[in-house]
Each structure stands twice: as structure tokens, then as C-alpha cells.
Image: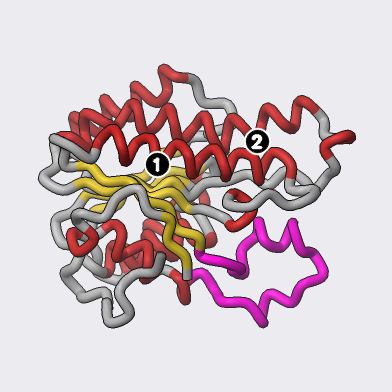
């Protein structure tokens, strides 16, 4: 599924919306956060590297966007209590969430299943699947406090059709699609919350570089080039659309 061809992000399409983005320190997460702030959103920037978060924070401030918040967290090692504490902090500071973008991901390595190390498998599942589940569950009351809330999962085509050597990454992306659809089905009636996934395709990110080290990133779309679909899904213009798999 694709976003409407004629949809363009206006300077106010996300005005007064409060949005949490994971993996916001670089790549697609950083580009989307900066674009969301430019469209009027107040951002909660979550990532494990504080320096990267500070750079995104400074860019948003320099652009004149609403003052964002920084929340350092390593999803690989986070416990259930960490997510509850995050939700409690957001409740005190903001009172609600209008958007949640699950962008953070761990590739690990491209390895045949027969040789995949169990410890690496667990780490990837923790970051790519358990973290979105625990974060979403902890934030559901905040999303319920919104008049119009959107959960968006950053997807990948290997999660929609299995591919050799993509191992735990591909499996977690497939499970994430199912998690999105389950949430959408459960929340469609009597809640203001919708859930969708977005596959941006090949993008020049550090994760892409790990998967394809011989590829020239200059020939790929840059993160700034692919943020429009994420803004659409996080905006009120996508209200009523849920359980869908979007792609560029």
C-alpha cells in the first residue's frame, strides 16, 4: 500500500502532536524526527548514544522547532521496569502520546541459520521485537489519552518474505508485522489508536551499510528523501487507516 500520491507535508501537519521515536540518533530516525519537528511536532528522542541525540536536538532547536526531549535508553538491555519508568516520565511531562515510531533496529550479521549464534539471536530479538512490544504496552495508556494516536513500525521487505541469511533480523521484522496487525485489530474499535508499518526500501543508513558493505551509499536514497510516508502515517491525515503495510 502507498500513501496518497498528492500528499505533501505542510508546515503544520503535525502541530501540537507529541511523538516518540526510537533510534532517533541517526539515519531514518533522526531524519524523521527533524522533519516531524519542522511540521510542528514535539519530539521525544530515544536512542542509546547521547551524543547522537544531542546533535538531533541541536538541529531541531536551530530550525526553530518545538523543544524536544532526550531519553537515552539501550533497548538491548532494557527491562520491563525501564519501559514502565519511561511511560511514567512521559505521563508527568506530557500527559499523552499522539505518535510512536518504532524505528530502532539491530541487524547483527547475515549468517546461515545453521551457524547463527544463540547469544546474537537473543540480542536481535530483544532489540527488534521485545522492545517494540514492551514499549507499546507501556505507552498504551498515553496513546489512549490522545484524540488521534498513531503507532508506526519501520519495516523491511525481508520481514514480508523470508530471505536466506537474514536470520534473526528477518524473523523479527516478520513478527513485528504480525504484532502491528494484532494491535491494529485489537485497537480498531473504541480506541483512538491506529497501527501501520512502513517499508522505506533501500536507504543509505549504517544498517544498510552493514548488510551491503560493497554498495555505494551515494547511489541510494538518503534518509531525508524517504521521510514523507512516515509523516503521513504520524499525522491526522492517515486517521482511519490501520493494519496496513505501506511501502515506497
Q: Distance between the residues labelled 1 and 2?
A: 21 Å
Span colored in magenta: 200-223
Foreground residue, 52 or 96?
96
- Can residue 149 be seen at all in this image of the molecule? yes
Q: In this view, does 210 lie above or below 167?
A: below
Q: Is residue 227 above or below residue 176?
A: below
Find residue 31 and report its image quarter: bottom left
Magenta-colored stretch includes residue 213: yes
**Residue assigned mark 2:** 124
Q: Where is residue 18 in the image (x, y as percent from the top left)?
A: 22, 49
Q: How many numbered marks appear? A: 2
Q: In this view, does 244 lie to the left or right of 131?
A: left
Residue at the (59%, 57%) spot, across then down:
157
Regarding mark 2 in the picture, which secondary structure is present there? helix
Residue that lies at the very extreme toward the right in this rendered image? 115
Q: Position of residue 79 (x, y in %)?
A: 49, 20
Where, quadrant-wise, is the N terminus in this rendering? bottom left
- Can residue 44 be seen at all in this image of the molecule? no
Foreground residue, 150 or 39?
150
Q: In this view, does 128 lie to the left or right of 112?
A: left
Magenta-colored stretch includes residue 94: no
Find residue 182 and report its image quarter: top left
Foreground residue, 3 or 140?
3
Among numbered discs 1 and 2, the one appearing first in the sequence: 2
Label 1 or label 2, whichever lies nearer to me, is 1
Q: Where is residue 88 in the image (x, y as percent from the top left)?
A: 26, 25
Q: Position of residue 80 (x, y in %)?
A: 44, 19
Q: Residue 181 carries which label?
A: 1
Q: Residue 58 carries which label?
A: none
Residue at the (18%, 29%) spot, across then down:
92
Dot 1 crowding, Cα within 10 Å, few <14, some 14–19, many 20+: many
Amino acid at each position: 500500500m502507498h500513501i496518497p500520491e498528492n500528499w505533501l507535508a505542510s508546515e503544520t501537519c503535525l502541530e501540537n502532536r507529541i511523538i516518540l521515536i526510537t533510534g532517533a540518533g541517526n539515519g531514518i530516525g533522526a531524519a524523521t524526527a527533524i522533519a516531524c519537528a519542522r511540521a510542528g511536532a514535539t519530539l521525544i528522542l530515544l536512542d542509546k548514544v547521547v551524543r547522537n541525540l544531542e546533535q538531533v536536538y541541536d538541529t531541531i532547536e536551530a530550525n526553530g522547532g518545538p523543544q524536544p526531549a532526550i531519553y537515552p535508553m539501550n533497548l538491548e538491555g532494557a527491562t520491563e521496569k525501564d519501559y514502565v519508568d519511561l511511560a511514567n516520565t512521559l505521563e508527568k511531562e506530557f500527559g499523552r502520546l499522539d505518535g510512536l515510531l518504532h524505528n530502532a533496529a539491530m541487524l547483527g550479521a547475515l549468517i546461515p541459520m545453521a551457524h547463527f549464534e544463540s547469544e546474537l539471536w537473543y540480542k536481535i530479538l530483544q532489540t527488534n521485537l521485545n522492545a517494540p512490544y514492551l514499549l507499546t504496552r507501556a505507552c498504551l495508556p498515553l496513546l489512549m489519552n490522545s484524540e488521534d494516536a498513531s503507532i508506526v513500525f519501520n519495516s523491511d521487505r525481508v520481514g514480508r518474505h523470508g530471505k536466506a541469511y537474514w536470520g534473526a533480523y528477518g524473523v523479527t521484522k516478520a513478527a513485528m508485522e504480525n504484532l502491528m496487525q494484532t494491535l491494529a485489530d485489537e485497537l480498531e474499535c473504541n480506541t483512538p489508536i491506529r497501527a501501520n508499518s512502513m517499508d522505506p526500501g533501500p536507504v543509505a543508513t549504517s544498517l544498510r551499510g552493514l548488510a551491503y558493505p560493497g554498495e555505494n551509499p551515494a547511489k541510494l536514497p538518503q534518509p531525508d528523501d524517504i521521510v514523507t510516508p512516515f509523516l503521513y502515517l504520524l499525522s491526522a491525515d492517515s486517521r482511519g487507516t490501520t493494519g496496513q503495510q505501506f511501502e515506497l
